[in-house]
Amino acid sequence: MSSKLMFNPRNAYGEALIELGEKHKNLVVLDADLSKSTKTIMFAKKYPERFFEMGIAEANMISTAAGLASCGKIPFVSTFAVFATGRVYDQIRMDVAYSRANVKIFATHGGISVGEDGASHQMIEDIALMRALPNMTVLAPSDATQTKKIVHLMAENIGPMYARVGRADAPIIYSEKDLEELKIGKGIVVEDGKDITFIATGTMVEPALEAKKILKEQGISARVIDMHTVKPLDEKLVLKCAKETKAIITAEEHSIIGGLGSAVAEILAENNVQTRFLRMGIKDVFCESGSPAELWEKYELNEKHMVKKAQNLLKK
Amino acid sequence: MKKLSQKELLKLDLIAVRIRKHIIEMLYQAKSGHPGGSLSAVDALVALYFVHMNHNPKKPNDPNRDRFILSKGHAAPALYATLAESGYFNVKELGKLRKINSILQGHPVCTSTPGVEASTGSLGHGLSFSNGVALAGKLDKKDYKVYCMMGDGETEEGQVWEAAAVASHYKLDNITAMIDRNYLQIDGNTEDVLKLESVKERWSSFGWHTIEIEGHNIKKILEALDQADNTKNKPTMIILNTIKGKGVSFMENNVDFHGVPPNQMERNYAMEELTQLEIKLEAQLK
């Protein structure tokens, strides 16, 4: 891992905002006293007149963004995932989703790898909450390159959108060229394989790629799908993988309830697909303080656990 | 403001009576909805839509229009009747309030009704939304104004105070908010449910210019709106002292009509009262 090129997706977000700010004069950014952490401060420094510090008042921030959107602005709203969704669910529901406002909620510090701050700050239900909202697109980019591309796509496609990234630095998976064709709602086959498919999202794509390498040494061929869009889900790709490989494991830094795993399960069940299937995620518990690596180990969300689960699932 | 003649003011009162009649009929037909807070809001809506605001029903999306945001979304019948009488859509639509396949949902939705700016019904959002519209106006150097009406009970919501602080911080003098101060909410008198007084001091202490007036006197409302428009560097709050159920004797100050529609007898009685007033005003106008 240490030899890999690491980059923080939050910085990629900040850089993307600067690029987009130049291109789209109607792009505005709002933050709730976390601009240094979410990296919206980069935009704030370059375009101070289009940056709105909203203070520690997230509910107002979301509804204000909807008001800005009603006047043709493209508001990017940022704070930690826990505050960007759970705290302001009603505001997102009414003013963004129901109103089809062109508001882009970009949350950082999603999942348990927030680490030491503990479960109060480890958002593991955001994807479930956002997925349940009509009109809402739900995104979880897996590395810095993809984050940048996704932020561009968010700005250039109309409609309510939610994206979340983790706090930690993450290995670079893609070059810019790799993602030229990236589309919202279309999963990426990062690595092909014929025995088992990992359908991963966000921070779990990288460990799935590592797991693939380990499994290969054991003679197991794993396919890795980067499902950066959890909603609308690439149903075709899910069914294709179910058909072409013998088992499916979903992986997400999120509760196993309501997120990617649930979405994939719904598709499999409704299409009468009989396959070996497992959801990897947080198993309906609140986690705790610890380093990201310790948490991923304890809550079984790293390549080691992915390998073990894949072996067991294929034995069934 | 251009000086309105006595006749012009009477005409506005007449419009207000007609809107109240629409409200009663709509709620009777819908068999559900909120009469009390709709009736108390009417006079301010008439002042805004028929005199004060720069708007054009033929161009509901004109980027330079003044905006009105009904934060107390349950007063939707008052807004719908006002929009219909202003020409945003056919008055016939009012009969479809709350019915299936209608453009008039139980609470306002910006995506379904021409002239409705924000989707409301969950209380406490409208002033925040107004902040966004006002910030966009400042950014684009447009001189449109934003008017936001809240219920008095609604200001128990914490988000309202987040919005109040932000509007003041950003010196959003293009916002004029109003509180429909009728002292009643579902569970009773606001001062018993969750004390609001002193409303004026609260808003003043948040840095707002605050005006308190009688909320059924259209002339006074118009004067307050002018004063608000001329207030610089701070937002303005107009506290409209109103009567819940205004215009229908048995609904006035009667909390039972917060969310209960009139039955047939009540509807007939209410329409009779309002029609009498209408005839009287028409006679005065002759």
Image: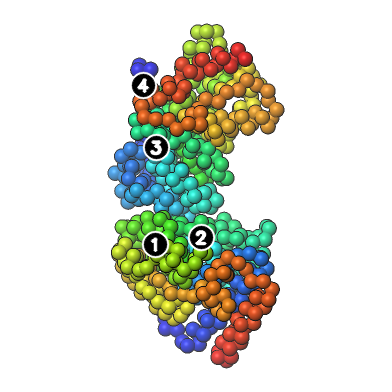
Name the chain under label 3.
Answer: A
Q: Residue at x 60, y 65 (%)?
A: B33
Q: Secondary structure at mark 3?
A: loop
Under circle 1, the secondary element is loop
10 Å crowding of disc 1: few (<14), some (14-19), many (20+): some
Q: Which residue is mark 4?
A: A5
Report whether mark 1 lies on the same chain as mark 2.
yes
Circles 3 and 1 on the same chain? no
Q: CA distance from mark 3 to mark 1?
A: 42 Å
Whichever of labels 4 and 3 marks the residue nearer the N terminus, that label is 4
The structure's colour scheme is rainbow
Q: Residues within 10 Å of mark 4 (few under 14, many from 20)?
A: few
Q: The disc labelled 1 sits on which kind of residue? A: Lys
Nearest-to-viewer mark from 1 and 4: 4
In the image, what residue type sits under mark 2? Glu
Numbered circle sitting on residue B142: 1
Q: Chain of mark 2?
A: B
